[in-house]
Amino acid sequence: MTTNATLNSKVPPPRSAVLDDAHVGDIKGALGTIKLDDDAPRQGLSARLKTLLAIVGPGLIVMVGDNDAGAFSTYGQAGQNYGTQLLWTLLMLVPVLYVNQEMVLRLGAVTGVGHARLILERFGRFWGAFSVIDLFLLNALTLVTEFIGVTLAAGYLGLPKVASVVLAAAIIIASAFTGSFQRFERVAITLCAGSLLLVPIYFMVHPKTSQMAHDFVVPSMPGGSGELAAVMLVIVSIVGTTVAPWQLFFQQSYVIDKRITPRFMKYEKIDLWIGIAVVIIGAAAMMGLTAAAFAGTDGFGQFSDAGAVAKGIEDKAGHLAGVLFAIALLDASIIGAFAVSLSTAYAIGDVFGIKHSLHRGVRGAKGFYGIYAGLVVAAAAITLLSTDYTQGLMTQFVQVLAGVLLPSATVFLLLLCNDKAVLGPWVNGPRTNAFTAAVVSVLVTLSLILTAAVVWPDISSDAILWIMAACGVTGVLVAGYFFTFGRRGTKEDHPPASGQGCPHDRTGRENWRMPPLETLEKPVMSTARKIGMGALRAYLLIAMVMVIIKVVQTALNH
């Protein structure tokens, strides 16, 4: 356990914005250690491999953690109802995953400050409070879906529901309460390895590899125009479960807690690519084996939940395959609960100045561990007290809420990565900005479709096409305005930090860190940005109110 004397010796370097002194020191990863004063150049394959092994963790855990219980449900639904025809969505999401999470890890390594705190400091109290409150509520509900996954896996395996949920909660809490970042990461990476159980199940069910390869690279829309609403809802769910708001908060804080600095940026990017490869392989395997298990059966097109998927796999490939799938679901639920709980505890610790590090023991960070454990216990209790119908409604609500909030999370991420006072020589380049702006426009469109499909379940295909067309026209108009008038306000929007020189000068950036937050000049909001932020605020409020009303009406009618 880390002692107070050890922590006090790790004083952040001068003009560093690091908020917790436990975030400065040796990098103690699950697979290796890098000393704080180890600044020797990494020459030779062996030295680079050892460095990579020590760095691996943040990108892998955040990616695999997103293949959680909700992902099992979403990918299972896609495979059972539409075969492998929606596999192409996974390929389309690869660059989105990389660009979003690369920006987040860059923010973490350069600033040393969590995502929620940066939003609070750079955009004001309203958006700071909004980001923490919506993250807290969304993560709490997401945690419940993780424990729903535990109950489904336990039900298939014939294990008692109450004992399984209590044991899973105890494992999730105990793994973080060791006072050792390294021990926690070892548990998390072990669970990441467990997610690869989907690969042998894939070969046991034996989908057609040629068909999988074709559908992975050739986009198609299953069904006719009359089924567009249902298909679009599944596509939006795939996007929502693969690119979730909590990922942004988790990876930025986890990179900081692991003490990764800009010097190791290229290794952390490799870690992220490893995580993306694992998550895409797992998602594709899940969709493919589910499609093969239900092809030509009465269950095709009749998805209910992941427990029924396990039964369908057993009917196709035997009891062992079904058991392995249930174990994989249990593994995914636990690692998802790890990541979601930590992202919340990190964010609240950042905003309220609470010591928030896995390097500290429980006594040294009581608030941090209390938030973490409280969330887990509350989610477990809600799961045990809820009915099957309530659980299904809650799962749907979580997916919708995540879809509604995702565009705003990406907008803040893009703005922060263009804030020259925050990232200095690490600000986004024009290509990253152009790609991310396109991603935001697509996410807004999908978010609108998702919200409309939930509020009006009988929405027509024509209505969906009108929404897409309206968003496309709006996007073109906004882009035209930006390229015509927006560049005039660039300098006033993001004044360079005093004494930092030209922020576009990339030389020596491995040693550049964001100065203390209180020394940064506040960004001046242009008229265009004020209008955009106001529109975003209005959309979020209207969409969330409409979704909440719909959920309440559904519950009362039942």
Image (cartoon, rainbow, N blue to C red):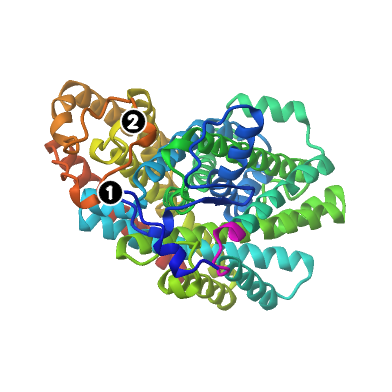
Residue 1 to residue 276: above or below: below
Mark 1 surroundings: few (<14), some (14-19) or many (≥20) residues within 10 A: some
Relative depth, front residue between 327 and 206: 327
Spatial distance from mark 2 to mark 1, Cα to Cα?
Answer: 27 Å
Q: Which mark is residue 27?
A: none
State the image coordinates of residue 23 (x, y, percent, origin top left): 42, 55
Tell me the residue that label 2 is attached to.
428
**Residue extent of the magenta highlight:** 177-184
Relative depth, front residue between 325 and 249: 249
Residue drawn at x 21%, y 58% is 125
Residue 425 in the figure: left or right of residue 85: left
Residue drawn at x 49%, y 35% is 98
**Type of residue at label 1?**
Tyr
Q: Quadrant of residue 424?
A: top left
Q: Earlier in the sequence, mark 2 or mark 1?
A: 2
Mark 2 surroundings: few (<14), some (14-19) or many (≥20) residues within 10 A: many
Q: Quadrant of residue 407?
A: top left
| Residue 468 visible, this angle | no
Residue 25 to residue 478: above or below: below
| Residue 148 visible, this angle | yes
Q: Quadrant of the N terminus?
A: bottom right
**Type of residue at label 2?**
Asn
Q: Which mark is residue 539?
A: 1
Q: Is residue 364 magenta?
A: no
State the image coordinates of residue 416 (x, y, percent, origin top left): 30, 41
The secondary element bearing badge 1 is classed as: helix
Residue drawn at x 68%, y 38% is 83
Relative depth, front residue between 276 and 527: 276
Relative depth, front residue between 539 and 153: 153
Mark 2 or 1: the one toward you:
2
Residue 465 in the figure: left or right of residue 147: left
